[in-house]
Image: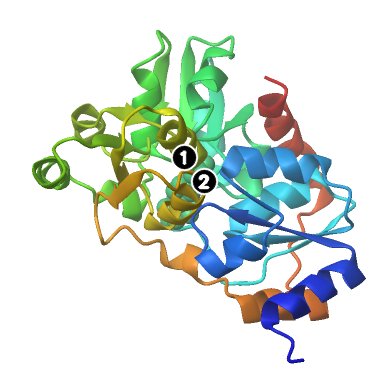
Amino acid sequence: MNQTIQDEIARLKREQGAVIIAHNYQIPEVQDIADLVGDSLELARAAAGLEEETIVFCGVDFMAETAAVLAPEKRVLLPAVDALCPMARMVTAGEVRSLRGRYPEAEVACYVNTPAEVKAESDICCTSANAVAVVESLDADQVIFVPDRNLGRYVARFTAKEILPWEGFCYVHDRMTVEDIDRARETHPDAEVLVHPECRPEVIDAADHVFSTSGMVRHVCSSPGEEFVIGTENGILYPMQKKCPGKRCYPLSEQAICVNMKKTDLPLVRKALERLEPRVTVPPEIADRARAAIERMLAL
Ligand code: 13P
Ligand code: SF4
């Protein structure tokens, strides 16, 4: 009997003592072979507690790096070595140091979409699922928030602290518009509009709810509503349909595709398991400081 690529991946995974975790934006075939699919926070939490020696991380670079920081004794593989999040490159460790010099009273909260070097310079890390609670947990009245300007401004709505946002952005979410929402409401007048906090402030104002990617899936499953317009990367529609099959979900924008999230495919996952590379590592002196910022978030 011919082996499918899914069978080969399952065999290699057993032989190598590996676990496969995947972000909600991954292509359906990759989500289907993963042991766990989730948002950045769920995947970071999982990576910290997995038993397997090898973690195959189907996502983008900063996510695999976060797993490597949290589980330094594990082998973390990123099947598509060029799956890079452009927003994570919009702030550097040197820029965070100079912001601290300019605002000595402020604490630094960094979005998980950052390199380990930036996390190492930060007081605490956050994801889209917990950014408000993270900022509220800080003692300082002034918070430097990097790199996403939209998430920073979203957090500022819910806190009395002064938020000093950086000018980074996600090109996938930043190009969603109020016109997209108006059009979607005309086409689907009974639908609830859900958007990600990486969207622009005016898009957030025009939406009904704001959630992380897994937060959107949970809302769609639990809401009495039947139709939803989804303002995030369109990969999310797959786990949504899988977990809430009775609901009808439409993309806010057909253009909402993160090319880096689509780079991982089954042949690359198989190759990673065969060769045990590409491996993501973080130098211990950076990892130890980055871990403090991530663990402080996970402890909340
Ligand atoms: P989530 O943490 O909501 O899954 O978002 C990750 C991300 O990269 C959004 O663009
Ligand atoms: Fe980065 Fe945006 Fe892609 Fe998320 S969707 S990984 S923030 S580029």
Which label belongs to residue 243? 2
Quadrant in the picture for the N terminus? bottom right
In the rendered image, residue 292, in percent from the top left (x then y), is placed at 75, 31
- Asked whether the residues under the numbered discs 2 and 1 touch, taking CB atoms below 8 Å apart as contact, a structural biologist would say yes
Of 274 and 144, nearer the camera is 274
Q: Quadrant of residue 22?
A: bottom right
Q: Residues within 10 Å of mark 1 (few under 14, many from 20)?
A: many
Residue type at tag 2 = Lys
Q: Quadrant of residue 20?
A: bottom right
Please give the count of numbered marks on the rendered protein: 2
In the rendered image, residue 251, in percent from the top left (x then y), is placed at 29, 52
Q: Residue at left 27%, top 61%?
A: 255
User: Mark 1 falls on what kind of element?
Assistant: helix
User: Mark 2 falls on what kind of element?
Assistant: helix
Q: Residues within 10 Å of mark 2 (few under 14, many from 20)?
A: some
Q: Residue at left 73%, top 81%?
A: 271
Q: Residue at left 81%, top 80%?
A: 275
Q: Residue at left 71%, top 37%?
A: 45
Would residue 106 be seen by someone viewing this image from the given angle?
Answer: no
Mark nearer the viewer, 2 or 1: 2
N-term mark: 2 or 1:
1
Q: What colour scheme governs how the chains and residues are painted in the rendered image of this protein?
A: rainbow
In the rendered image, residue 132, in percent from the top left (x then y), is placed at 48, 21
Q: Which residue is mark 1?
A: 217
Of 116 and 76, nearer the camera is 76
Note whether 121 is above or below 29 in the view shown.
above
